[in-house]
Amino acid sequence: GHTRIGPIPAWTKGARSRNPTQVSQIICINPSVHRRPSSINRSINSEQQLCLGIAWARGLGSAMGSPSGMEDARLKGHSDRVWNVSWSGHSGTVLASCGGDKSVRIWNKGSDGSWECVEKLEGAHQRTVRRCKFSQCETMIATVSFDATTCVWERKGEGWELASTLEGHESEVKDVAWSPDGELLATCGRDKSIWIWLKEIDDQFECLDVLQGHTQDVKTIAWIPSSRAMVSAGYDNTLKVWNEVSEEWVCTQTLDSAYQGHEDTVWGLAFSPQGGKLVSCDGQGMILLWEIKSQEEKYELTLISRNQIASGKAIYSIDWSRSGVIACGSGDNSIILLDCIKDPEDGTEILKMRKEIKQAHAADVNCVSFHPRHPDLLASGGDDELVKVWNVR
């Protein structure tokens, strides 16, 4: 089950920055594609701070000093930082986690409400496992690693077996995503490339396309709901939209700081429940809200608003629940919950803080993921080697 195609350009060397520049102002910027963000930043007065919900700036909103009371479960087992957590498909009956200990752990919740690690997938990856993602049908898990490989695990009876190992990336693989129809798998990495894999009838995978366009690490990829179009983002501070054209994927839009995009590494992407909006987060605590427009099955993004987290710390992960709540995992060890509302001044959609869970983990929060059926349940993973499940009702 190995697949490789020709060599690709050498990857950019350089360590990941985990110390984002501090942001001293709380800002909200109305979109204008012809003006750079720095030229239209404006200070937020106390009334506007309330609208944005950046509550800790003036003691507004709801900020929890202790995570107790919301923490539903603490899952111990990993011996290194936890990079990713993933609920199974549509049902969410199983939770998977992966991390620096080169393993993937499968967790089940018992009838008594306690969580148990029922299986540990190891031996396939030789370095950190960066991401793990269930297929839509819940019978497969794709994992990607700093060892440059992608593994696909298949459910066999009550357990999981390694079905395929996909090779091609020249260095660390950072993210993996199943297409909405379950037929395609996308991977991206430090070699600045995105690979599109087709799942064949025998559960093997064929590489359909290798996408070049980013100038540095590609940190994250996400398929636009109900489509075969993708959004990618990464260390070059850009978002790119890829549309399928004649069975190939073409970059049809690049959004950078010149078009009011990000000015720091983009770490995460999440779509709204209806699929019409996208949020992206970066290393300076900026969250951009985008509208997804389509015409003749070609997709593009239009900026709605820029929303700055007051701490200025990196947001490493972001997710959007089916009930409309947005969760962020932060470099200041907190989890931040946001609502999307309309600014009472001009009607622009902005983000308002609902809650801040301070010290949700004892170190960086690397991942947050809402349960697919129960939007009050949120899983998180952190540098403190823990997986946690929260009740965020």
Image (cartoon, rainbow, N blue to C red):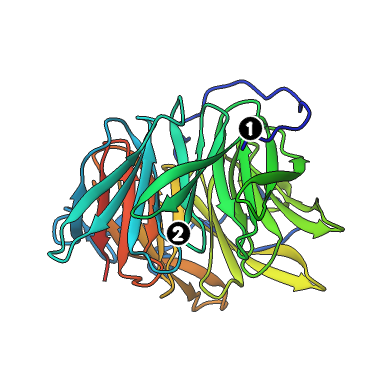
Q: Residue, x 71% and y 45% (percent of image)? A: 206
Q: Which residue is mark 2?
A: 319
Q: Is residue 134 left or right of residue 257?
A: left
Q: Which x, y percent locates residue 362? A: 23, 39
Type of the residue with mark 1 = Glu
Mark 2 Cα-neighbour bin, 10 Å: few <14, some 14–19, many ≥20:
many
Q: Which residue is mark 1?
A: 167
Q: Residue, x 65% and y 49% (percent of image)? A: 232
- Is residue 377 something that shows in the picture? yes
Q: Secondary structure at mark 2?
A: strand
Q: Residue, x 33% and y 72% (percent of image)? A: 374
- When the figure is inspected, residue 2 is found, relative to residue 230, above or below; the finding is above
Type of the residue with mark 2 = Asp
- Is residue 26 something that shows in the picture? no
Q: Secondary structure at mark 1?
A: loop
Mark 1 Cα-neighbour bin, 10 Å: few <14, some 14–19, many ≥20:
some
Q: Which x, y percent locates residue 267? A: 52, 44
Q: Quadrant of the N terminus?
A: top right
Q: Which x, y percent locates residue 287? A: 51, 55
Whole-Å distance between the Cαs marked 2 and 1? Answer: 29 Å
Q: Is residue 215 left or right of residue 175?
A: right
Q: Which x, y percent locates residue 169? A: 65, 31
Q: Nearer the viewer, residue 146 or 103?
A: 103
Q: How many marks?
A: 2
As drawn, the label of residue 204 is none
Q: Residue furthest right?
A: 246
Q: Residue, x 46% and y 31% (percent of image)? A: 124
Mark 2 or mark 1, whichever is nearer to me? 1
Q: Nearer the viewer, residue 304 or 81?
A: 81
Mark earlier in primary sequence (2, 1): 1
